[in-house]
Amino acid sequence: MIHIVATYVGPQSPVNHDALIDSLRQTGRECGGLEHARVYASNASIRGVLFIGGMESGAAQMYCREIFEQTVISSPKLSGWTLSHCDFLPMT
């Protein structure tokens, strides 16, 4: 499981959280590996946990960063979003 936080720093208002969340899930499905995403939106940020299958923690973090970047780059309506946190959630 990877914990992510994305922050909106663009000029557009109001912020469209749903567009980012939907696009992130779609990119994850297309790339494979993303089993499930639980994402919550608040003001100009989103927080969530991405469930990645079959990868060790370092590879899973890198994968999450890559799908986030690919998601934002592929859609002009998502410009202004930045990934401010991406870290492995240890299972205890």
Image (cartoon, rainbow, N blue to C red):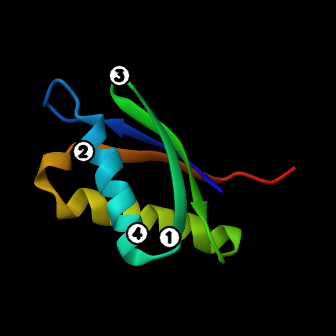
Q: Amino acid at mark 1?
A: Tyr
**Mark 4 vs mark 1: which is more N-terminal?**
4
Residue on which disc 1 sits: 63
Number of the front mark, 1 or 2: 2
- Kindly state the secondary structure of the residue where label 3 is placed: loop
Q: Check residue 19 in the rendering and tell me which mark sits there, or answer none.
A: 2
Percent from the top left, x then y, of residue 64? 49, 63
Number of the front mark, 4 or 1: 4
- Of residues 16 and 10, the one drawn nearer to the viewer in this rendering: 16
**Mark 3 vs mark 2: which is more N-terminal?**
2
7 is higher (above) or lower (below) than 3: above
Q: Amino acid at mark 3?
A: Asn
User: Mark 4 to mark 1: distance in Å?
Assistant: 12 Å
User: Which picture quadrant has residue 7?
Assistant: top left
Residue on which disc 3 sits: 43
Count neighbours of disc 2 (C-alpha within 10 A) and say few if under 14, some if 14 to 19, many if 20 or more. few
- Kindly state the secondary structure of the residue where label 4 is placed: helix
Number of the front mark, 3 or 4: 4
**Mark 1 vs mark 2: which is more N-terminal?**
2
Percent from the top left, x then y, of residue 19? 24, 44
**Mark 3 vs mark 4: which is more N-terminal?**
4
Task: Report the residue at 40% width, 69% height from top.
Answer: 29
- Of residues 21 and 80, the one drawn nearer to the viewer in this rendering: 21
User: Mark 3 to mark 2: distance in Å?
Assistant: 14 Å
Percent from the top left, x then y, of residue 2? 61, 55
> In what quadrant of the picture does the N terminus appear?
bottom right
Q: Are marks 3 and 2 in contact (CB under 8 Å)?
A: no
Residue on which disc 4 sits: 29
- Kindly state the secondary structure of the residue where label 1 is placed: helix
Q: Residue furthest right?
A: 92
